[in-house]
Image: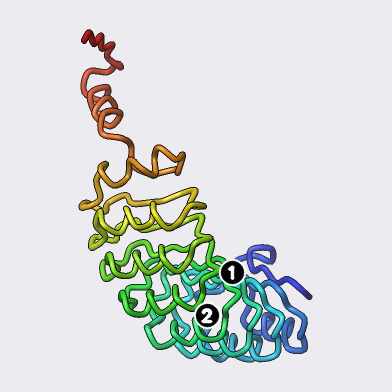
């Protein structure tokens, strides 16, 4: 098999069946295991990673029973990796992310949503070495701030999609840096980033970048419509 997607075989695939199916497989290019989170551990995953060096896409969202050794194994065994999803994998730490950055230079898409151990230093290190990134999610991480976002902006000029939802330490300065250094940016998510306001977003908005927060005037109209039950007509004469 070149592709193993657990969603295609159901969420209740037995662990033993998984091990038998992939025991002799050495040509995998895509591996999606988010539905195996109830039982997937390093014991089952590491042998698969160790003999499939052509892997380009790996999805491990929510696989909470793995450890940092899984990410180290991926970084050492998958030099052609282009897409990696690790959302809600809180075992991802700075050291294992550095290993990924050192060995997977072709990475284009990385999801680190709710990987709460990661701080600015590790994210900056990643950006400096994986400068082909086009899509990156750092959502739901209160440790991520302006330093990491500014390094991403300066190092990853091909960036198209960035998710900073709930990154409470991100402020206007880094958003302005994104606008300056990332001409290919298409979507930016900054909902619940309370220190990011329209003064920094307006430049991106004028370029057609899709934002997940409304401009202030439109937001006020929506709130007013919720209160009075209809959209008001406003006649301005200057």
Mark 2: few, some, or many residues within 10 Å (few <14, many ≥20)? some
The answer to whether residue 33 of the structure is visible from this angle is no
Indicate whether 42 appears above or below 35. below
Provide residue 69's location: percent of width, then percent of height. 48, 90
Provide residue 5's location: percent of width, then percent of height. 67, 68
Counting residues from the start of the chain, the first of labels 1 and 2 encountered is 2
Q: What residue appears at the point 69 percent right and 66 percent down from the top-left corner? A: 9
The one of 222 and 12 positioned closer to us in this rendering: 222
Residue placed farthest to the front in the image? 180
| Chosen colour scheme | rainbow
Indicate whether 44 appears above or below 150. below
Q: Nearer the viewer, mark 1 or mark 2?
A: 1
Indicate whether 24 appears above or below 227. below
Q: Name the residue under label 2.
A: 39
The answer to whether residue 179 of the structure is visible from this angle is yes
Helix, strand or loop at disc 2?
Answer: loop
Helix, strand or loop at disc 1?
Answer: strand
Q: Name the residue under label 1.
A: 83
Rounded to the nearest angstrom, the CA distance separating label 1 from label 2 is: 23 Å
Mark 1: few, some, or many residues within 10 Å (few <14, many ≥20)? some
On the picture, is 28 further left or further right than 125?
Answer: right
Q: What residue appears at the point 77 percent right and 74 percent down from the top-left corner? A: 2
Provide residue 153's location: percent of width, then percent of height. 41, 63
Quadrant in the picture for residue 36? bottom right
Image quarter where the N terminus lies is bottom right
Q: What residue appears at the point 32 percent right and 79 percent down from the top-left corner? A: 121
Q: What residue appears at the point 55 percent right and 66 percent down from the top-left corner? A: 109
Specify the label residue 17 is tagged with.
none
Provide residue 76's location: percent of width, then percent of height. 58, 90
Quadrant in the picture for residue 15? bottom right
């Amino acid at each position: 098999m070149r592709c193993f997607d657990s969603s295609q075989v159901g969420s209740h695939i037995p662990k033993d069946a998984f091990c038998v199916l992939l025991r002799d497989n050495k040509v995998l290019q895509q591996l999606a295991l988010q539905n195996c989170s109830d039982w997937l551990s390093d014991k089952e995953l590491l042998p698969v990673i160790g003999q499939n060096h052509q892997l380009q896409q790996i999805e491990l969202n929510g696989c909470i029973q793995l450890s940092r050794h899984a990410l180290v194994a991926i970084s050492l065994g998958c030099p052609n990796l282009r897409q990696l999803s690790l959302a809600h994998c809180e075992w991802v730490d700075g050291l294992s992310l550095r290993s990924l950055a050192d060995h997977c230079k072709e990475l284009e898409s990385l999801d680190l949503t709710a990987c709460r151990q990661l701080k600015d230093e590790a994210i900056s290190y990643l950006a400096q070495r994986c400068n082909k990134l086009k899509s990156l999610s750092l959502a739901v991480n209160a440790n991520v701030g302006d330093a990491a976002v500014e390094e991403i902006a300066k190092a990853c000029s091909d960036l198209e999609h960035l998710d900073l939802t709930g990154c409470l330490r991100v402020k206007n300065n880094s958003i302005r840096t994104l606008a300056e250094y990332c001409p290919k940016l298409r979507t930016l998510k900054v909902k619940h980033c309370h220190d990011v306001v329209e003064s920094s977003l307006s430049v991106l908005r004028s370029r057609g970048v899709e934002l997940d927060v409304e401009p202030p005037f439109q937001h006020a109209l929506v709130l007013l419509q919720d209160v009075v039950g209809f959209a008001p007509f406003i006649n301005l004469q200057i």
